[in-house]
Image (tube, rainbow, N blue to C red):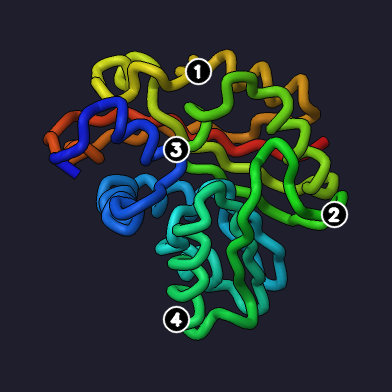
């Protein structure tokens, strides 16, 4: 990861590909581990629920989401390399019957209307220049009362990252407003701070927001 320049790293984080894909996936797992655990806890998947994750990489954290009895999981991921690696990981974890990754785009989710109970997206908002189309899609696939957890870097913190220069940085209040416009009610907010190595290997004080919303 340290060998990648900022622009190349940004492109890999959006869609891991080529020879670096697997290493990028593992780096994201290390960098995002604590944030994923916080997001999973806030989403609180219940027994029998169908869970959707947007941009799960190699699905390293899917087992955490599937601790509830009878819960099921689908991850929608841009990277074909991550889809392959993720499905292998799920099979090795004994979850192939309850979980799968599909190649796809959050702007056109390959899921039926009102087919999801809970949805999660960790560190993916930076790749959505306009929040509305993706949030509208999430509202479509979630049934009324379904939950959505968004975890994303504070815009001020993100501006300190060289590789995030071309990311779309969304202020907290703008994300809250976009959720309301797309048919969600924000029910909880958490601030998440940690000091760990980022995707570029540098130690930093990190600041993230977690929002939980319900489909109206």
Residue wearing tag 2: 112
Earlier residue among tags 1 and 3: 3
In depth, the one of 212 and 3 nearer the eye is 3
Cα distance between the residues tagged 4 and 3? 26 Å
Earlier residue among tags 1 and 2: 2
Residue 60 position in % (x across, y down): 41, 63
Query: Is 195 left, or right, of 29 in this rendering?
Result: left
In depth, the one of 22 and 120 nearer the eye is 22
Residue 208 position in % (x across, y down): 37, 31
Cα distance between the residues tagged 1 and 4? 35 Å
Cα distance between the residues tagged 1 and 2? 28 Å
Q: How many marks?
A: 4
* Comparing labels 1 and 3, the label whose residue is closer to the camera: 3
Would residue 33 be seen by someone viewing this image from the given angle?
Answer: no
Q: Secondary structure at mark 4?
A: loop
Query: Is 76 left, or right, of 162 in this rendering?
Result: right
Cα distance between the residues tagged 2 and 4? 27 Å
Residue 66 is tagged as none
Q: Are marks 1 and 4 in contact (CB under 8 Å)?
A: no
Where, quadrant-wise, is the N terminus in this rendering?
Answer: top left
Q: Secondary structure at mark 1?
A: loop
Earlier residue among tags 2 and 3: 3
Q: Are marks 2 and 3 in contact (CB under 8 Å)?
A: no
Query: Is 181 left, or right, of 94 in this rendering?
Result: right
Residue wearing tag 4: 93
Residue 14 is tagged as 3
Q: Secondary structure at mark 2?
A: loop
> How dense is the environment of label 4, judged by Cα within 10 Å: few (below 14), some, or many (20 and up)?
few
Earlier residue among tags 1 and 4: 4
Earlier residue among tags 4 and 3: 3
Residue 49, by quadrant, is bottom right
Residue wearing tag 1: 170
């Amino acid at each position: 990861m340290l060998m990648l320049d900022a622009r190349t790293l940004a492109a890999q984080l959006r869609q891991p590909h080529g020879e670096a894909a697997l290493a990028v996936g593992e780096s994201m797992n290390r960098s995002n581990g604590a944030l994923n655990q916080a997001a999973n806890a806030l989403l609180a998947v219940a027994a029998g629920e169908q869970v959707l994750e947007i941009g799960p990489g190699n699905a390293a954290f899917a087992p955490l989401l599937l601790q509830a009895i009878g819960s099921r999981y689908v991850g929608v991921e841009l990277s074909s390399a991550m889809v392959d690696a993720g499905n292998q990981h799920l099979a090795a974890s004994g979850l192939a019957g309850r979980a799968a990754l599909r190649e796809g785009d959050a702007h056109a989710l390959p899921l039926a209307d009102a087919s999801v109970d809970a949805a999660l997206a960790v560190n993916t908002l930076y790749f959505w220049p306009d929040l509305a189309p993706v949030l509208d899609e999430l509202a479509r696939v979630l049934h009324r009362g379904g939950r959505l957890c968004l975890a994303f870097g504070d815009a001020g913190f993100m501006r300190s990252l060289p590789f995030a220069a071309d990311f779309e940085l969304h202020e907290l209040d703008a994300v809250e407003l976009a959720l309301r416009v797309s048919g969600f009610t924000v029910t909880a907010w958490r601030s998440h701070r940690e000091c760990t190595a980022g995707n570029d290997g540098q130690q930093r004080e990190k600041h993230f927001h977690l929002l939980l919303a319900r489909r109206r």
